[in-house]
Image: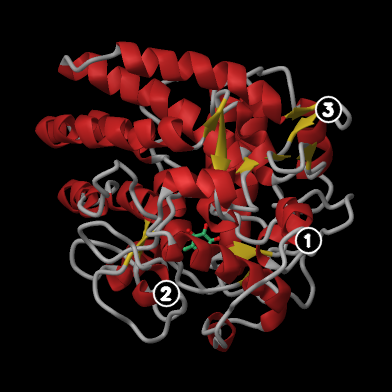
Amino acid sequence: MPTMPGSPREGRGMTDPDDAARRILRGNDRGGYTVPTAGLYPYQWNWDSVFAAMGFATFDTDRAWQEVETLLSGQWPNGMVPHILFHKVEPTYFPGPDVWGGVGPVPSSGISQPPIAATFIRWLAELDPAGADRAKAMVGPLTDWHRWFFDWRGEGGAICVSHPWETGRDNSPDWDAPFAAIEPANLDAYYRRDTSHVAEDERPRRWDYDRYLTLVKLGHDCGWDEAHLREVSPFRVADPTMTFTLLRANRDLLALAQRFGAETAEIEDWIAAIEAGSERLWNADIGAYDTFDMRAGTHSGVISNASFLNWYAGVRPERMLDHFDRIAGFLPYGVPSADPQQPGFEPKRYWRGPVWAMMNWLIALGLRDAGHDARATALCDTTRSMILAGGFAEYFDPRDASPAGGRDFTWTAATWLAWASPSAKGFPWQA
Ligand code: GLC
C-alpha cells in the first residue's frame, strides 16, 4: 500500500473489515430495501440496491432476493424501473416525491438508472439455486424494463438519458456542454439538503443543481410523458453507462430467458442493435468512448470511468487499453471518474475525479471477461487498499484514498464483500 502522510485513514482501525461491511448493510437495511447511506440518501436507489443485493448474497441470500424484488415492485406500467423509490417520506432529502411526481405504484422519481439488475440476478441465481423461481419471476419485468429503454431512449442502438442523474454519474464533466445550453427557467426557490450532510466542495455546484431541477420540472409538468420529452427536452445525451450496462444486461437476460424457457428473439435483436449503436459513442478524435449530445450533435471529449465499461459490455476488447493504462496508473488510486489529465478534473468533487469502488468492480469484471486478467487483478488490489485506507466511503480521492462524500456506504460495503475482500469468491461465470 502506498504511504499517505497526513491523509485521513478512516479504514485503518478496522480489525475485521468483512464484519464492518456486513454491519453497514444491516445498519442501512430499512426492511426489504437498503438505503445507500442514512441522512444523505434515505430512500431506495436503483443500482445501489443491486449492489446491496450482491453484498447480502455473501451472507443472506433470502435478503438479497428481497432487495431486488422490492426494487421491481416500483416498476411503472410502461416498464420503467425508477431511480429512486420513496417508500416512506424522509425530510432529510431533496428533491422528494412531490417534486418528482412519479406515476408508478410506489412514489418515485421519474427517471431510471443503469440497468445492472439482470446481470446480477443471473449471478444470484447461480449462487443460490434454491432461488430459481424468484429469478424466473423477474425475467418478465426485466424484459419490460429493457424494452422501455428501446422504446424511448434508443437512438440507433445508443442509449440516451433525459437527465444526468439517470446515468448515476451526476456531475461528470460530460454534462458541462449540454448544461451550458440550458437556461434554468421557472424554478421555485429551493433548499438543498445534500450540502448539510457533505462538504460543499465534494458535491455538485449550484449551477448544476439549477439545471438538474429544470429538467425534473420539465418531466414533472408533462407527467413524464416520454414521447413529449423526446421532442422537447433540451437534454438528450447518448451515454456509455447506459449503453454498456444495458448491452451486458441483455446478454445476461438472454441467458436467463433461455434457462427459463422465455422468449429470446427480441432480446437477441436488442443485443445486435446496441452492439452496432455503441459505435456512436466512439470518439475517433480522442480514441475513446464518451457521451454524444443528440441535440448538439457533438461528443463530450471526456474520458470518464464509464468509458471503460466497453469490456463489461463485451465490446471491442482491444479498445481503451492505452487510455486505461495511462489513467488508472496516473495517480496512486484508480480509476478516477474523470481523466486527471483533462481540464474539469477535480479530485474530490463527486463524479469529476474521485474513485468509485463499485465502478472499479464493473470495469474489472469486464477486463477479466475480455482476457485482460492482470489489469483486472491489479484493479481489485488497488480497490482493496483504497477501502482499507479510507473506509467504506461513498467515493475516494485518487491521490491518497482519503474518503469523501457519505460514510458507511452500502455499495462500497457490498463491493468489498462480493469482490474486493480477500474472502470474496468472485464471479461464478465468464461472460
Ligand atoms: C448519487 C450517485 C448515484 C447514486 C446515488 C445514491 O446520486 O451519483 O450514482 O445512485 O447517489 O447512492
Q: Which mark is residue 180?
A: 1
Question: Secondary structure beneath disc 1?
Answer: helix
Q: Which mark is residue 287?
A: 3
Q: Quadrant of the N terminus?
A: bottom right
Q: Residues within 10 Å of mark 3 (few under 14, many from 20)?
A: some
| Residue 418: quarter of image | top left
Vertical side of 195 occupied by 228: above or below: above
Left or right position of 309 against 27: right
Identify the amino acid type marked 1. Ala
Q: Residues within 10 Å of mark 2 (few under 14, many from 20)?
A: some
Q: Which residue is mark 2?
A: 99
Residue at image position (29%, 30%) is: 143
Residue at image position (66%, 35%) is: 308
Question: Secondary structure beneath disc 2?
Answer: helix
Q: CA distance from mark 2 to mark 3?
A: 40 Å
Q: CA distance from mark 2 to mark 1?
A: 23 Å
Vertical side of 289 occupied by 4: above or below: below
Q: Earlier in the sequence, mark 1 or mark 3?
A: 1
